[in-house]
Structure formats: structure tokens, C-alpha cells
């Protein structure tokens, strides 16, 4: 659960950074950014995989660059759904989606690769034969 909340906050920060760097993206409040991050996360979970599969030949031809266009369209969809979150034009959506993707990728890379000290499970058990012939 804490991982989901952390990723939600990362996407929120990424949206705020995109609005700060790209002049065509405007956010009215922090609450709007949090809601937009939640909706964008849900869209990325449910709609984006379907779009990726449907446009797979085009993604293969463009060596995956077309995925950025899908991200831009999904960002425009979120802006259409949420009042107070505006994206003006496809170029602003493309640049915003690029910033959001890079920030999310970097942050998630550090979260996923964080090693937690856990006791190691041995794949091999050393056993000795006792005097009575039983293995211990």
C-alpha cells in the first residue's frame, strides 16, 4: 500500500514539474494535481495496455517512439476530464508526457531497486547422518 501511495506522489510531483517547465500546462491547485495523478495512474493501468497492444505494429516500426504519442494523448484525456487541469495543444501534451515519463521512471527506478535486508533462504540444507542411521 505504501508503494502505491509513493508512486502516486511521484506522479503528482511529475505533473507539477511538467506544469512548471511547459508553458501550455496549467494546474489550479495541489488537489487538482493529486486527482490528476490518480486518474492518470488508473488510465495507465486500464487503458494504456489496450492502446499499446492495438498500436503494437506502429510501435515496432517506430522503435517504441509511438508510445510517447500515446502518453501525450492520455495526458490530454486526463486534462479533458479534470477541471482545473489544462493542456493546450498536442506539443504541450507531448512535452508534459515526456517529463512525466522521465521523472516517474527515475523515481520508480530508485524505489524498485532499493534493497531491503531480508534473511536469505538457503537453497541447500546440510544434513548429517546420525549414529542411529537417521538424517538430521
Image (spheres, grey):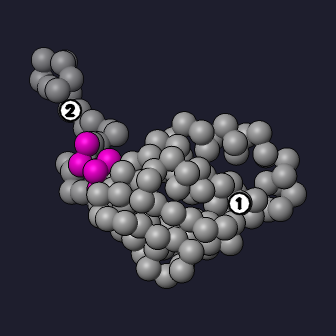
Q: Residues within 10 Å of mark 1 (few under 14, many from 20)?
A: some
Between label 1 and label 2, give the one nearer the viewer.
1
Residue 90 image point, x, y percent: 69, 66
Name, please, the residue furthest toward the left: 131
Residue at image point 64% right, 60% down: 72
Looking at the image, do the residues carrying marks 1 and 2 touch, with CB atoms under 8 Å apart?
Answer: no
In the rendered structure, find residue 123 and report the number of the disc placed on it: none
Q: Quadrant of the N terminus?
A: top left
Residue at image point 45% right, 50% down: 82
Segment tinted magenta in the rendering: 1-7
Q: In this figure, which residue is indicated by the disc labeled 1?
A: 69
- Tag 2 secondary structure: loop
Task: Say if the magenta span includes residue 19.
Answer: no
Residue 61 image point, x, y percent: 87, 57
Residue 46 image point, x, y percent: 54, 36
Q: In this figure, which residue is indicated by the disc labeled 2?
A: 128
Q: Quadrant of the C terminus?
A: top left
Q: Is residue 92 left or right of residue 128?
A: right
Q: Is residue 109 left or right of residue 128?
A: right
* Looking at the image, residue 54 lies above or below residue 21: above
- Tag 1 secondary structure: helix
* Looking at the image, residue 110 lies above or below residue 40: below
Residue at image point 36% right, 51% down: 35
**Alpha-carbon span between mark 1 and mark 2:** 62 Å
State the residue in front, 51 or 106: 51
Quarter location, residue 88: bottom right
Residue at image point 60% right, 56% down: 76
Please say whether residue 135 is visible from this viewpoint: yes
First reached walking from the N terminus: tag 1 or tag 2: 1
Amino acid at each position: 500500500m505504501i508503494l502505491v501511495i509513493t508512486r502516486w506522489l511521484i506522479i503528482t510531483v511529475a505533473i507539477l514539474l511538467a506544469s512548471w517547465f511547459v508553458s501550455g500546462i496549467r494546474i489550479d491547485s495541489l488537489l487538482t494535481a493529486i486527482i490528476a495523478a490518480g486518474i492518470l495512474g488508473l488510465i495507465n493501468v486500464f487503458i494504456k495496455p489496450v492502446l499499446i497492444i492495438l498500436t503494437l505494429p506502429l510501435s515496432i516500426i517506430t522503435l517504441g517512439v509511438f508510445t510517447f504519442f500515446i502518453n501525450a494523448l492520455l495526458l490530454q484525456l486526463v486534462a479533458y476530464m479534470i477541471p482545473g487541469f489544462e493542456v493546450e495543444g498536442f506539443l504541450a501534451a507531448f512535452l508534459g508526457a515526456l517529463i512525466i515519463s522521465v521523472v516517474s521512471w527515475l523515481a520508480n527506478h530508485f524505489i524498485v531497486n532499493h534493497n531491503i535486508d531480508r534473511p536469505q533462504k538457503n537453497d541447500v540444507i546440510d544434513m548429517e547422518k546420525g549414529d542411529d542411521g537417521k538424517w538430521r
